[in-house]
Amino acid sequence: MTTDTGKPTLTVDELAARAGVTVRTVRFYSTRGLLPPPVIGPRRVGHYGREHLARLELIEELQHQGMTLAAIERYLRQLPPDLSPHDLAIHRAVVASWAPDTVETADRRELEERTGRPLTEEDVERLAAMGVVQPDGDGYRFDAGLLRLGVRLLDVPLSQESILAARNVLVEHARVAAHELAELFRGEVSERDTEDVRSLSAHMHPIVVQALLTTFQRSLKEELSGWGAPSQAGGSSS
């Protein structure tokens, strides 16, 4: 398990189990440089943390989207080097949003296993309000690509109304950006055959996702950087 401070405490077996992959897969990604090296503890045992898990989940999502290993390596090399586990989780959620619906069904126990934490009734209601999970008979239907991000939002000190308002803002502007980009590229594919169109689409998805997300993160960081600055209201005294 990991500590609240993010100190690496997962063994390679625990990391693989959390991510739903094999130990061999973890070691393979590590040898290719896709995962940072573990922290070596007593008895030369490697320990992994939340960054390793988030990066591993992003790699698996990119592979699920059909990207080759070489394409995944290029994608990861272009990411800012200081991305936090939370930033990596957002990248994964956005990448997953390009995929066909990944809706799954689970009972309460299975849902908590997927989130890695117990869920109160209020938690489930908030996830439902965010559109991440929906009651379905005796169980729940949930968007696998957004579940982990939705659970992280449960700990954000914002009201449910603010979270939903933020979601509406993001959805509205994302649709506008998607429409304008589609119109921009329409002329490029109008005279190409179906296979060329599919190839262009497959290559453009991860590139556009990364460009939008990186630009948004930088813009948001600039906006938030001024929050702690002292107010200039009222001017200075002479």
Image: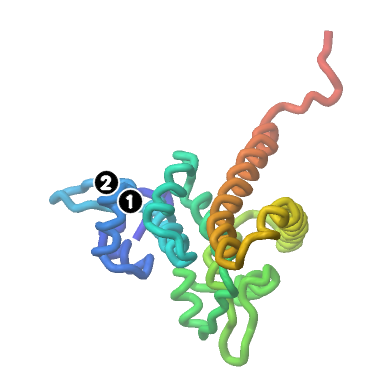
Q: Quadrant of the N terminus?
A: bottom left
C-alpha distance separating marks 2 and 1 = 7 Å
Amino acid type indicated by mark 2: Val
Question: For mark 1, does the 10 Å Cα neighbourhood hold few (<14), some (14 to 19), or many (20 or more) residues?
Answer: many
Callout 2: helix, strand or loop?
strand
Q: Quadrant of the C terminus?
A: top right
Identify which residue is drawn at 60% across, 62% down: 197
Q: Position of residue 50 (x, y in %)?
A: 40, 54
Identify which residue is drawn at 49% across, 52% down: 88
Which label belongs to residue 39?
2
Q: Nearer the viewer, residue 149 or 94?
A: 94
Identify which residue is drawn at 59% across, 74% down: 101
Q: Position of residue 64 (x, y in %)?
A: 45, 67
Residue 193 falls in image quadrant: bottom right
Which label belongs to residue 8?
1
Mark 2–mark 1 CB contact (< 8 Å):
yes
Q: Nearer the viewer, residue 167 or 126?
A: 167
